Amino acid sequence: MNFQNKYIQLYFKVGFSNKKILLLLAHLNKLVISMSTLKRRLRFLGLFRRKKYADLLEVAVFILQQQETSGKLHGYRCMHLKCIQSGFNIPRDTDSQLMKIIDPDGVKCRLSRKLRRRQYASPGPNFAWHIDSYDKLKPYGIAINGCIDGFSRYMVWLEAGTTNSDLKVISNYFIKAVKEKAGCPQRVRSDFGTEDVYVANRQKFLRRNHNDEFAGDKSYLSGKSTHNQRIEWFWGILRKQMVQYYMDLFADLCKDGHNMFCGDFVDKSVIQFCFMDIIQSDLDDLRCTWNKHTMQKKPGNGSGKRPILLYSIPHIYNAEDHLYSTDEMEVLVCEGETTPKKMCDETVFELCTGLMTENNLMKPSNANECKKLYVTLRQILKHELAEL
């Protein structure tokens, strides 16, 4: 398969329309072809939107599998996109009907009315990155940090770690994103607090020699969390789509009669060891799905568009990219003063790894397996500690 067909197949399976595929090929891959050529290639590759629908039983099984994970919180639009990305070609209406049959209570719950929010305006991508920490899983040792682009609502990063209090870890997220984008945003917005001080210093340092009105000290803005609208709004999405599932799972460990989590150092560290990879995988999956989904049409910026398109090719939406180039050596210097996130305490990691080898325990592949592994490792560790 030549590289042109490879890109066409990739964009088709992500769920883009033919018109969007042509735009992506032209602006991202420098490949200009006509609509008729695209349709001919799609037929050649056997890619159809209204033919060769996936078997309903296989789709139903896939949705049932998603119901056993944080996917149980997804609405039919998000689930339809996940089906398409997993190779199941079905109409959205069919997906909606299957959801009503498989998860009627969840559908009914999601039909509740939403709050009306004030409108947000931004001149283009990378004009403002909104950074914040999410602590709903912090009682269990899981700290989430994220950054969203204000104009496109494109998630720049979404990371799970052991802490949101270490300034060097948070700044590492920022510098990694700057390296990936080969530039920094015009402005960074975060809440009042000490955890983003290093991010502020690095943003001001990287923007010190630019000549725009927001260069230098004005390139960083902090304020009340209620004013950090974009990222605070996304946390509501995150909870509905994923975090509530883990909150319920962890709360189940604390229920009377279970007594499998008391919140001490050992319990939190074992939770981190067992769950961190799976939670990060779910965050990566949610970020990928979110960046490619079609936003609902409503008044304001970016209505009815996809975050990844608004972010990557803003000029087709009459917007301008505000990314500012950075010196590669300066970025490397900044990176050297940051600390990569850790999975869990190093001593606990070595102990748990050794116990898994001794007891022939397999690495978990989903949250339920993580829970079983946690219960097993905790019992062994608590027993061994009690004998000391």
Image: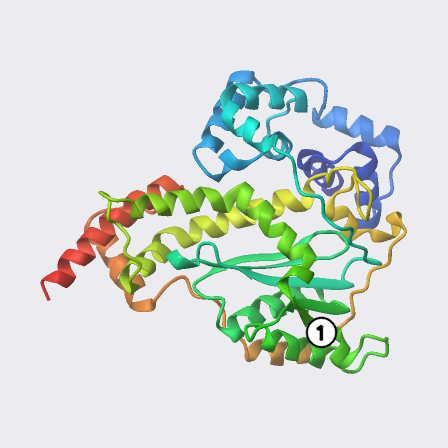
In the drawing, does residue 239 fall left or right of residue 348? right
Q: Position of residue 202 (x, y in %)?
A: 65, 78
In the drawing, does residue 120 fall left or right of residue 377? right
Q: Residue at x 75, y 74 (%)?
A: 219
Residue 311 vertical placement versus 175 (above, below): above
Q: Residue at x 29, y 47 (%)?
A: 373
Label 1: element kind: strand
Q: Residue at x 66, y 39 (%)?
A: 114
Residue 197 picture quarter: bottom right
In the drawing, does residue 241 fall left or right of residue 127? left
Q: Position of residue 64 (x, y in %)?
A: 47, 26
Q: Nearer the viewer, residue 64 or 44?
A: 64
Residue 273 picture quarter: bottom left
Quadrant that contains the N terminus: top right
Q: Amino acid at mark 1?
A: Tyr
Residue 95 vertical placement versus 254 (above, below): above
How would you rate the neighbour count of disc 1 (Cα within 10 Å): few for under 14, some for 14-19, many for 20 or more? Answer: many
Q: Position of residue 7 (x, y in %)?
A: 72, 41
In the drawing, does residue 308 fall left or right of residue 192? right
Whether residue 33 can be seen here: yes
Q: Which residue is mark 1?
A: 220
Quadrant that contains the C terminus: bottom left
Residue 274 vertical placement versus 34 (above, below): below
Whether residue 365 can be seen here: no
Residue 90 picture quarter: top right
